[in-house]
Image: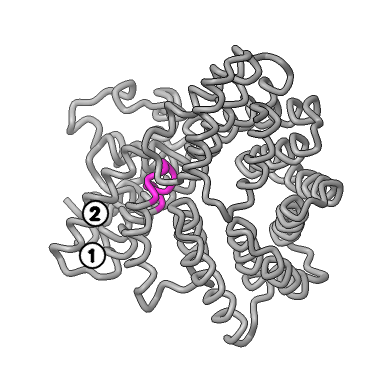
Amino acid sequence: MHAVAARETIGERLRRLREERRLTQRDLASPGVSPQYISRIEHGDRNPSVKALRKLAAKLGVSAEFLESGNDPAPTESRSFRLADAELALRLGEDPAHLEATFAGLLEEATSAGDAVAQTRAALGLGTVAAHRGDHDLAIAQLEVAVLAAWVTPLRNADAYVTLGHSLVAAGREEEAVALFRACVEELAARPPIDDGAVTRFATYLSYALVDSGRLEEARQANELALRHGQGCEDRSTRIRLHWASARLAASAGDLKVAELSITRAITLIEDSEDTDALARAHLVAAEIALWENNHAGAADHLARAETLLPEGSALEDRVFLLIQQAFVAARSGEAARAMDRANRAIQLLGDHTDATIRGRAHWALAEAYASAGATDSAHAAFTTAGELIPPGSKHANRLLEAWQLAVPG
């Protein structure tokens, strides 16, 4: 059979496998892979995309590699192909529940086979999916082990370290996030030839973590390091990170005009790319800065843009941050009912989310909604809950206290 398969075209192999399984072209169809598209592949009029290959292979119960080439790889090689398939699906933002099950199955299989590399790759995938849905404790458990593998480095696997750092911050373990990012910066800066873009990336993330923990002077030093390594860099992603880091630092230091200018520059650069996720997040940051300036109309404009850009199944924190910001705008514009709706939806979505700060901000938004409606006792109770959740040293603590005193005097 292998000799026959090797002489087949992709279209011929697709048709043979489909007919062996007594499936119609409509049975194999899925979003983006129509029966007509399948027919054109089978007749040799169209080469399938990588995404189409993966979808068709999954329905046929074979690997994408086998469907494409006719080669039946050895178990280790097959696992590697399936991991690559799942990793690509993760980058494309496909169904997280399905991906989690896929990575979990591959992890179990790799563990049984003693395939250490596949184990690590599966753990990296599981950790990333967990972080995406807001389960930061599980993300940390998977990623902390995975990054210990000798072949996993900040240069080769930057996203894994970034995700781990984000989860550490979300879990209230800012000092560990700072230590992680500082170690990444030091490792990258000590290994010639120095990749200035990589150093800049991790120096900006170090700055973010320091801002979140209220250590603004250290954050400024990290930002200066990022600027030194990113000076003259033409890479758009690096320039975006520099403007974004400057915006966060300036906003936390109270330099709101500088913060607004920096995030606007970042938005302008992102608009030239196709990264709608990043553009949505940038508008969310811009909305927060506008709120701090009491520019409610400006904040509403940014939130409207973010809402249209956030894709289906976007990260939980992005969806919740949008609702919280909408609640703040509504409460401060006298729309108490809308504010309560948005704040309560955010609280419901979060549940027992690991990040106490974001839960605290949702209750803070609800408190302002109650205050806007004149429900002083309910507002006071919600502010109390917010104060218990938001760490005293965080960048939000002082603003929470000011809002509390303004909304519920005495």
The residue under the point 69% across, 39% down is 402
The secondary structure type at the circle numbered 1 is: helix
Magenta-drawn segment:
128-136
Q: Which residue is mark 1?
A: 76
Q: How are the colours assigned in the image? A: one colour
Q: Return the residue found at the far left.
A: 112
Image location (x, y in percent) of residue 179? 51, 72
* Quarter location, residue 107: bottom left
Q: Is residue 398 visible?
A: yes
Residue 45 percent across, percent down from the top left = 48, 35
| Amino acid identity at mark 1 | Thr
Q: Seen in the image, is 409 located left or right of residue 292? A: left
Q: Residue at x 54, y 17 (%)?
A: 341
Q: What separation in Å lies between label 2 and label 1 (alpha carbons)?
A: 11 Å
Farthest residue to the front: give it.
Answer: 410
User: Tags 2 and 1 in contact by the CB under 8 Å rule?
Assistant: no
Of labels 2 and 1, earlier in sequence is: 1
Q: Nearer the viewer, residue 8 or 200?
A: 200
Image position, residue 344 (x, y; %):
49, 22
Is 141 displayed left or right of 331 in the figure? left
Q: What count of labels does the image hold?
A: 2
Which residue is under mark 2?
A: 106
Q: Is residue 226 above or below residue 401?
A: below
Residue 50 can be seen in this image: no
Quarter of the C terminus within the rendering:
top right
Q: Kindly report which numbered mark, 2 or 1, lies closer to the viewer in this rendering.
A: 2
Q: Does the magenta portion include 283?
A: no
Above or below: residue 265 compared with residue 234: above
Quadrant of residue 272 within the rendered picture: top right
* Along the line of sight, the residue nearer the viewer: 23 or 235: 235
| Amino acid marked by disc 2 | Leu
What's the residue at 56%, 21% (across, down)? 342
